[in-house]
Image (cartoon, rainbow, N blue to C red):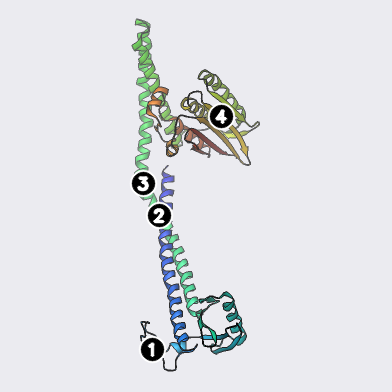
Amino acid sequence: MIKKLRIKLVAASMVSLLLVLFGIESIVGFLNYTKIIRDADRILEVLQENSGRFPKKFPGERKQGRPFFSPELPYESRYFSVLFHAQGEIISVDTGKIASIDTGTAMEYARKVWAKQSEKGFVNHYRYLACPAAEGMRIIFVDCGRQLDSFQNLVITASIVSLLGLLLVLLLLVYLSSRIVKPFSDNYEKQKRFITDAGHELKTPLTIIDADTEVLEMDVGENEWLGDIRNQTKRLTDLTNALILLSRMEEGRQKERMIEFPLSDVVLETVSAFQAPAKIQEKALDSTVAPMISMKGDEKAIRGLLTILLDNALKYSDEKGTIALTLEKQKNRIFLTVYNTTGQIKKEQTGHLFERFYRMDASRNAQTGGYGLGLSIAAATVASHKGKITAETEDEKSLRITVMFPVS
């Protein structure tokens, strides 16, 4: 339990940090990319106003609400333009302000833009603007290669730094999480030891009470009060034994004899033992058990698991309800499923069924004599065999408990 708590703490922290870093990088990346596009569009607007070239006297100042442009901008910018006739024929090509583009490449890029009929966009790393001209249409391209390369380097650098930061935080969390959960771990261990020790201490007085009850019955004969004492003593003894068993299993002190045994035969024997009680209660108990399935584990513990699951299904199924058990093997896994109809169960309740003392219906448990420990013991048994147990309801009128064991 404490190990799972540490894993959840580290996982939640790492996911939170990852989302925060992703959000920050996304915002920074978006702002940088939009700035590249905005600056390129402003340059294209100036070129549009001057027939695809910078004016001879570039003012380098704010004009018509535009931000300040450096006087060096005409010499730093690399651009070219292609002039089209209204029918789509190329009239002229201007590549005088760029060395990396020849006339043929400029015409190829311009035809792509003409075919798309879009006003703005990118062709490779060139930002373009298609604007009307006296002869037809002029398409102006501005080289954004350096800006886009810088943006790409920023993204790569930020990603690498973020990954290194995540790795460092992960190492710190793994180290610090043990200290964070230590108070909970200590309290949990003390609680388990208290339950185990108190259970052992209770056994002696319970045994004495039971023996004294027998002596009194021999002297005064059987009566209602002594019978009630005997019944309550038995209930308390069963509860104490269940608590001790659960604590030992969670502490890992319950020694299990892991041997190969015929699981199919064990399941059939257990189901057979519940046929009579099911018939008396007028409930249908069906089973589908694949033959020749064996597993390595503690046969006694698995018998106890089957008894708990079938007993719960029988107790909490509705009047004249249906109970179905299925055992099958799929590849390297064994699946045991116990299904029963029930009066009503909410989907949110299924996540609490394996908690200690959890009861879906307290009044119903009082009638059936349950303590809310059976499924906790079942979950501990499955965990000790490195399996997984889940509970689900599809229609909130039935319950399906599935146990998965790996085949060793």
Query: What residue is disc 3 on?
Result: 182
Cβ–Cβ below 8 Å for labels 4 and 2?
Answer: no
Q: Is residue 262 visible?
A: no
Residue type, mark 1 in image: Gly
| Three-letter code for the amino acid on which mark 4 is drawn | Ala
Which structural element holds mark 2?
helix
Of the image marks 4 and 1, the number of the one nearer the N terminus: 1
Marks 1 and 2, Cα distance to the nearest angstrom? Answer: 50 Å
Relative to 29, residue 174 above or below: above
- Of 219 and 226, nearer the camera is 226
Of 269 and 319, nearer the camera is 319
**Sequence-wise, which precedes: disc 2 or disc 3?**
2
Disc number at residue 13? 2
- Asked whether 291 or 192 is in front, the reply is 291
Q: Earlier in the sequence, mark 3 or mark 4?
A: 3
For the residues bearing labels 3 and 4, Cβ distance under 8 angstroms:
no
Q: Nearer the viewer, mark 1 or mark 2?
A: 1
Q: What residue does disc 1 label?
A: 60
Query: What's the CA distance linking mark 4 and mark 1?
Result: 84 Å
Q: Label 4, on which residue?
A: 324
Count neighbours of disc 3 (C-alpha within 10 A) and say few if under 14, some if 14 to 19, many if 20 or more.
some
Marks 2 and 3 sit apart, C-alpha to C-alpha, by 18 Å
In this picture, residue 104 sits left or right of residue 96: right
